Amino acid sequence: MKKFKSLSALLLAGIFAFSAVGCGGGESEEAATDTALTNTPGVLVWATNAEFEPYEYREGGEIVGIDAEIAQRIADELGCELEISDMNFDSIVSAIATGKADIGIAGMTVTEDRLMNVNFSDPYVNAGQAIIVAEDSEITGEADLADKTVGVQLGTTGDLYVTENISGVTVERYTKGFEAVQALIQGKIDAVVIDGEPAKAFVASNEGIKLCDDYLTVEEYAIAMNKNNDALLSEVNNILAEMQEDGSLQAIFDKYLNSESSDATADEEVSDEEGSDEEETSADEEAPVSEQADGEDAGSEDASLAAEE
């Protein structure tokens, strides 16, 4: 009998220890007991590229923005400490696939190529690729980009779209979006194709450049996770659904975007009149689906660019 009690105690201790692996203390009991939620117990590693205002950017030594608040909410709900891994945008998918990070949130567009390596959550915002040109440029839209030199951020959907869809174009690829904008200001390239919200930030912060009226694409931003971690995928989708239902997701967008650009959440359709049909989107109306159509950068420290930099 004594041996039986001792064995029972050991088994119970083992069960409690097993339950503690993963994130604990959050609101989801399933999350607290699932050992496969995160690579490191109690820590949610968020891979991002903090050069993409207003989604993720540096302010006062901290990484802030729409995606930063979403990542923190997910960590809180899972009972995890949030650890930020800031890296080049084109390294994020690899970091997720190899287990170096748990989630990738970086204004990342869902594409077929990326789906071969990672899973994506339900989308949380609709957005698209915008064209920035010099104020005196004759470029007004996609057709005018043919045979021009266009700057893009390496590995983004802007890079993919221009490369695959614009005839005769010369593509100049930059590690950071602000470097492409800098090249435009200096007259080294004819245009920049980059995500809409950072495009607005660049134009507002720099003289001599403007946005073309129409977007090139309509895209969906979602959260990347390892293809073998269905448990985390389910938890994240549940959290996003809760944020949409309780209004907190919309509140985050309202905090960082003006009222015109944040009036549709992830479970709402944006009408053609609001400029987000599958052909084109008005450059001043980008809304949550609640999308850097893959992380094109626009960090607050980099948004204002002097031509001589």
Image (spheres, grey):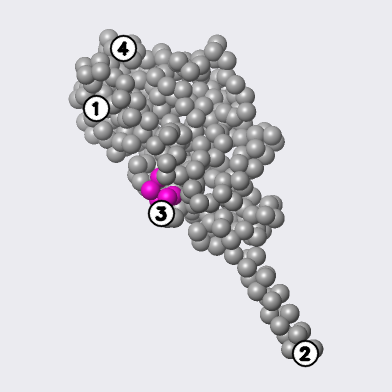
Ranked by sequence position, the earlier of labels 4 and 2 is: 2
In the picture, the quarter occupied by the N terminus is bottom right
Q: Name which residue type carries label 1.
A: Val
Labels 1, 2: front one: 2
**Separation of marks 4 and 3 at Cα, in angstroms:** 40 Å
In this view, the residue farthest toward the bottom is 2
The residue type indicated by label 3 comes to Thr
The span shown in magenta is: 93-98
Which amino acid, mark 2?
Lys
For the residues labelled 1 and 3, the Cα–Cα distance comes to 30 Å
Circle 3 SS class: loop
Mark 2 — residue?
A: 2
- Where residue 81 appears, x then y in whole percent? 56, 56
Asked which secondary structure carries label 2, the reply is: helix
Nearer to us in this view, 121 or 142: 121
Foreground disc of the pair 1, 3:
3
The answer to whether mark 1 and mark 2 are in CB contact below 8 A is no
Q: Nearer the viewer, mark 4 or mark 3?
A: 3
Q: Decide which of tag 1 and tag 3 comes sooner along the chain.
A: 3
Is 224 in front, or is 27? 224
Rendered image: mark on residue 47: none
Tell me the CA gap for discs 1 and 2.
76 Å
Quarter where residue 10 is shown: bottom right
Residue 143 tag number: 4
State the SS at label 1: strand
Residue 98: give its label: 3
